[in-house]
Image: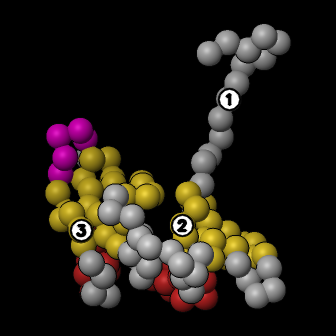
Amino acid sequence: MTDTDEVPIRFGRIAATLPVKDIERAKAFYVDLLGFKPVFENGDPVGFVILERDAAELHLTLQKNHKAADFNIAHMMVEGIDQLHALVQQRGLKVVKRLQDKDYGLRAFVFEDPDGNRIDVGQRL
């Protein structure tokens, strides 16, 4: 792709937006379990939330008729994947793909959040 003004195009961080049926329950899950912090809320009642932790940003959007997809909708790169996997199991969350080392250089697993959103988690080997 070329730019006619000769100004290079550079992309920054892209944040995943997760649809949720109950925004307060979803916010509590990501804050209490995963340690995210709410940095922005919009609406009355709240219908959109931005959460941050370290370099990660996650958006929650209220979709009362949300039906979870049968594929991964977000990918998180982390450090401490074994600890996160243990935490997910301790909380009784559904693990869709077990923790394993992949031939493409990641240790990874997939779990579902309370709304059934599949989150793929990876850590470089």
Q: CA distance from mark 1 to mark 2?
A: 25 Å
Report the side of 52 relative to 90 (left or right).
right
Q: Mark 2 is on which residue type?
A: Leu
**Is 42 located above or below residue 81 in the figure?**
below
* Corner quadrant of residue 73: bottom left
Report the side of 85 relative to 10 (left or right).
left
User: Counting residues from the N terminus, which is met first, the one under dot 1 or under dot 2?
Assistant: 1
Q: Mark 3 is on which residue type?
A: Val
Residue where numbered disc 2 is placed: 18
Secondary structure at badge 3 equals strand
**Is 45 located above or below residue 119 in the figure?**
below
Residue 35: mark in rendering? none
Q: How many marks?
A: 3
**Where is residue 79 shown, x and y percent of the image?**
38, 59
Residue where numbered disc 3 is placed: 96
Q: Residue at x 65, y 35 (%)?
A: 11
Residue 10: mark in rendering? 1
* Corner quadrant of residue 81: bottom left
**Where is residue 117 shown, x and y percent of the image?**
41, 70
**Where is residue 87 shown, x and y percent of the image?**
32, 80
Circle 1 packing at 10 Å, graded few (<14), some (14-19), many (20+), is few
Q: Residue at x 31, y 70 (%)?
A: 111
* Corner quadrant of residue 6: top right
Q: Residue at x 81, y 86 (%)?
A: 44
**Is 8 located above or below residue 15 in the figure?**
above
Q: Which residues are magenta?
A: 101-105
Q: CA distance from mark 3 to mark 1?
A: 34 Å
Secondary structure at badge 2 equals strand
